[in-house]
Image (cartoon, grey):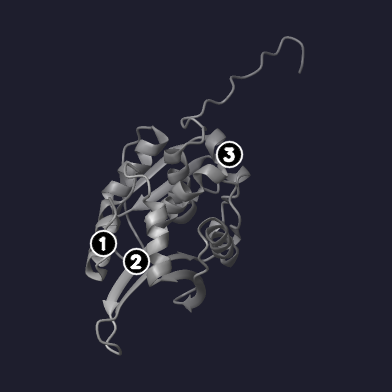
Amino acid sequence: MERGVKPGPKPKGKVKIKWSANFAYAIGLLATDGCLSPNGRHIILTSVDKEQLENYLKCLNIEVKLGKKTNGHGQTASVIQFSDVLFFDFLQSIGITKAKSLTMGKIAIPEIFFIDFLRGCFDGDGHTYSYWDPRWKSSFMFYVGFTSASKDFIEWIREEIKNRIGIVGHIATAKKINTYYQIKYAKYEGIKLVREMYKNKKCICLTRKKLKINESLGTMGVPRLS
């Protein structure tokens, strides 16, 4: 540094970077539904679900005014966008890249918070569905799954779930405009997975997804999530 030249102020982060169950959940939402801007500063999350955005702000413990935009399906969605270079760099350091949908693989999540991260991913791009199978009498089908354009990310999620919960699921490939990948867990594997994701009765989550799961569990005659 040249003599007489004072250093500039260090950048201040909007987000406190400290791992917790809620922080890991927010990272899961960003990994699936969020994006990092090309300018290296802005973190963006867009959703038509207001509760999802409220959960995200609560988990990061920040206040940001919601904006509006039209998504790719012609729906009016709300968007949270803020500038935080330190948080942006942190996200890249753990594996969430600018072109994450194509390049994302393993995310560096502390083991103790992986399930919270997974629940965030589920509330982002996860899904569950159920139906009566007409081929067999009284056969009710139940599936839980995750979707991503990154095969490496889906394969990593599958391996982590297998190591922690002991279920294997299966990966399917589909294509609309671009190719994407889904990992699915059927019936009893799906039940085991949701019980693990919602083990903490007070965990933060999307109400509508938990209610949908409980409706399916009730139809199957098994205990619902607390």
Whether residues under marks 2 and 1 lie with C-beta atoms below 8 angstroms apart, the answer is: yes
The residue to which callout 3 is attached is: 90
Mark 3, other Cα within 10 Å: few <14 / some 14–19 / many ≥20:
few
Mark 1, other Cα within 10 Å: few <14 / some 14–19 / many ≥20:
some
Is 176 on the left-hand or right-hand side of 219?
right
Mark 1, secondary structure of its residue: helix
Residue 223 picture location, percent across and down: 27, 59
Q: Earlier in the sequence, mark 2 or mark 3?
A: 3
The residue at the point 55 percent across, 62 percent down is 162
Q: Is residue 39 visible?
A: no
The residue to which callout 1 is attached is: 212
Q: Nearer the viewer, residue 10 or 181?
A: 181
The residue at the point 25 percent across, 86 percent down is 137
Q: Earlier in the sequence, mark 2 or mark 1?
A: 2
The quadrant the N terminus occupies is: top right
Residue 217 picture location, percent across and down: 27, 64
Q: CA distance from mark 3 to mark 1?
A: 34 Å
Q: Amino acid at mark 2?
A: Thr
Q: Amino acid at mark 1?
A: Lys
